[in-house]
Image (cartoon, coloured by chain):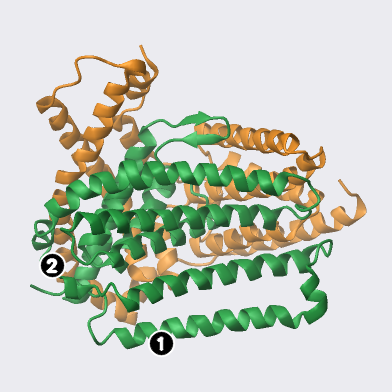
Amino acid sequence: MSLIERWMSRFSLEQLKMTLWRTAYGNKDTFLSRLDPRVLLIWYVFFTVSPWFFYDRTVLVALFAVSLTLALTSRVSGLILFLMGVSTFMNLVYIGVLALFLGGSGDAFLALITLTLKLLIMGLASVAVFTSIDPEKLSDALLALRLPAPFSFGISYGYRMIPILVEQYQDVFASYRMRGCPPARKGILSWRIGYYFCKICVLAFYPTLLNTAKRVRTTVEALEMRGFTYTLVSGDARRLKLSRMSIRPIDGIFCGLSILYVAAAVWAGHQLAL
Amino acid sequence: MKQTHNIMVFVLSMAVFGLSDLVTELIPDVSIGPVEIGIPYFGFVGLILVMLFNPLYAALGASFGELVFGDLLMGDFGGIGEIDGFLVLFIGLWIAGLLVKNPSNRKMIAIAGMIGIGLDQFMSGALDVMKVGFGVADLEAVEGLPESIVILELIENGVEWLVAGILFGIIPAIYMVPRMYGKIEPLMGIRPREPRDVTIGGAVGRLALVAVIVLAFAAVFAYMSEVMDGTGEWAPDFVDQFGQSFIWIGIGIAAVVALIVILLSRRNKPTGGTSISRHV
């Protein structure tokens, strides 16, 4: 079996749909999901911006430890962690080798480790936060933080609708395959089969676009029937929608501990240089 | 009704572009050395949407869909790091949409598509290079590193432009846009685009140019201020000559340019400007 055929058989739209369902409906009882989504988002912004201002490796290692712990406790899928590790490693190796090749020295690695640490801290924190935050809560939090309403609506719409859209696309794709005829000869590295699949992938978007246009019109008209645009301008509707969010002591404790931890890391960084 | 149409365009573009992003995740990447050859995204989906509907909302929706479906739903959301990708894709698609006056003109579609995706790739490459400069304190101290990063980014974004912009960009778009033109808009109760809806001449050209200039200014000054404040190891000569006030001059220029943009877009609004989604 050639490479392309093997890939085609391993990754199916069915599997993709399962991943989507898992993200949308799983992982609801982790530590981070107990926090208020608004507090979590603000904390996250600070946590991912702050690494850029530290050039001290001790502080970065400390921050890295926190984000790794959070990622492990919030049940991030192993595949994503693995992919992250591999890509980080590969990046490091490639850039290092290329720098050496172009006449650099071993310093390149030290400089790059700092950057890689920063990127890893941000990546891990992002994965941890966004897998433990419920999509409904996320969209409410964004609304509470005054993001334009179409964005927050888009997130909840996406989480509910995309599995249906994937299914629709799958049907269109299957019908193209049934009516079409696969190439008789495979060609070198079965490029003909690859080309055939890519062509169907592209063509299947034609009916999908038309179908989705109709579907979207129905959705938006139904929304307007229930006063969607009005709720955006009316304060009462907004307050009612957001009333279930509340900031509890655990949020305060979490933020306080984070600040203390970073301060301790900075102090430690001055004491011993890594 | 206009507001409703804009929401419709936004949601449609978000859903379909997000879906296409999921599909590209299924198609494997082939990596040759450090350069990954794969399909970054299906450029044609975004191009079709911005060329047929209101470019602003279609581009916003497409880049947001990429963010939500491609990353958030699949569980690998990069957070803050995704925002620059969002902006860059948005600007690229928006400009591509603004450039197309008549969606049945294939030549126009091809040129606009190449420019739009090219802008996207160019800006994302430039941002990547700057991010490395920002993150590594003593980048200049390491010989050969800046050059190697620039070369890598050039190769990678060039390849991505070929794949997302040409193969899966304008080639399908040239086929689909004229066919869909006048078919998909009535499904949503929107009048198909007419040449007068989009003024390709001065207004758009200026807007695009000025947006790029502002971005470049902002990026350069962000980078310079970081280099000078952060480490103090490397400072360009002109800082010694002009002192710190030089930075403020730069910020001032950027602000003036931004002001001009705002004024220009204000002035263009009453004449119809770029709005295309009116009720039939």
User: Going 24% across and 78% down the picture, which residue do you hit?
Assistant: A230
Chain B appears in which tint?
green
Pick the residue in front: B266 or A24.
B266
Mark 2 crowd level (few <14, some 14–19, many ≥20, 10 Å Cα) = many
- Which chain's residue wears label 1? B
Image coords of residue B133 (percent x, y):
68, 55
Q: Amino acid at mark 1?
A: Leu
Label drawn at residue B263: 1
Image coords of residue A94 (percent x, y):
65, 34
Image coords of residue A150 (percent x, y):
32, 66
In space, the residues marked 1 and 2 are separated at their CA atoms by 29 Å
User: Going 58% across and 52% down the picture, which residue do you hit?
Assistant: B128
Quarter of the image containing the N terminus of chain A?
top left
Chain A appears in which tint?
orange
Image coords of residue B266 (percent x, y):
35, 86
Label drawn at residue B190: 2
From what the image shows, is residue B19 above or below residue B127? above
Label drawn at residue A140: none
Mark 1 crowd level (few <14, some 14–19, many ≥20, 10 Å Cα) = few
Identify the element where label 2 is drawn.
loop
- Which chain's residue wears label 2? B
Pick the residue in front: B79 or B165.
B165
Quarter of the image containing the C terminus of chain A?
top right
Compared across the picture, whether B144 is left or right of B265 comes to right
